[in-house]
Amino acid sequence: MRDFNSYNQNENESVNQLNDLKAFAKKYEGASEDEIISQILLEAQKGRRNGTLSDSDIDRFKNMLYPMLNARQREKLEKVVKKIKNN
């Protein structure tokens, strides 16, 4: 952190990501794992096409989720991240 403004910006970005994650979880509550992964890939492809999803965005998202997941879920997340970055 260089200054308070950069901290505030990073904090706001984290809050926005968490809110997006909560909305996504609520929207797909009860969906199968395959449905959720397909939707994540579809949304990522849209973001890649329109230039709103970078590798660093993907890494931040992964790093936010990683501590909340078990080993099996982490492995799946790694596979999804790899697919997104390779598309």
Image: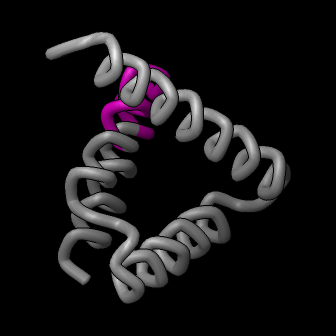
Q: Quadrant of residue 28?
A: bottom right
What colour-coding does the image apply?
Answer: one colour
State whether residue 3 is above or below residue 20. above
Query: Which is nearer the eye, 32 or 11?
Result: 11
The quarter in which the N terminus is drawn is top left
State whether residue 22 is above or below residue 41. above
Q: Total of numbered circles in the picture?
A: 0
Query: Which is nearer the eye, 58 or 71?
Result: 58
Looking at this rendering, what residue extends furthest in the bottom direction?
49
State whether residue 45 is above or below residue 36. below
Q: From the top left corner, tell me how far across and down residue 18 is, in percent.
A: 59, 33
Name the main secondary structure of what is drawn in magenta: helix
Looking at the image, which residue is at 75% across and 47% down? Answer: 23
State whether residue 60 is above or below residue 58. above
Q: Quadrant of residue 5?
A: top left
Left or right, 25 with reference to 10: right
Looking at the image, which residue is at 35% across and 38% down? Answer: 74
Q: Specify whether residue 63 is painted magenta.
A: yes
Left or right, 16 with reference to 14: right
Q: From the top left corner, tell me how far across and down residue 79 is, in percent.
A: 29, 59
Q: What residue span does the magenta drawing correspond to?
A: 62-73
Q: From the top left corner, tell me how far across and down residue 65 is, in percent.
A: 44, 33
Looking at the image, which residue is at 51% across and 29% down? Answer: 12
Q: From the top left corner, tell me how far across and down residue 48 is, in percent.
A: 35, 79
The quarter in which the C terminus is drawn is bottom left
Q: Specify whether residue 13 is painted magenta.
A: no
Query: Which is nearer the eye, 26 or 47?
Result: 47
Q: Quadrant of residue 75?
A: top left
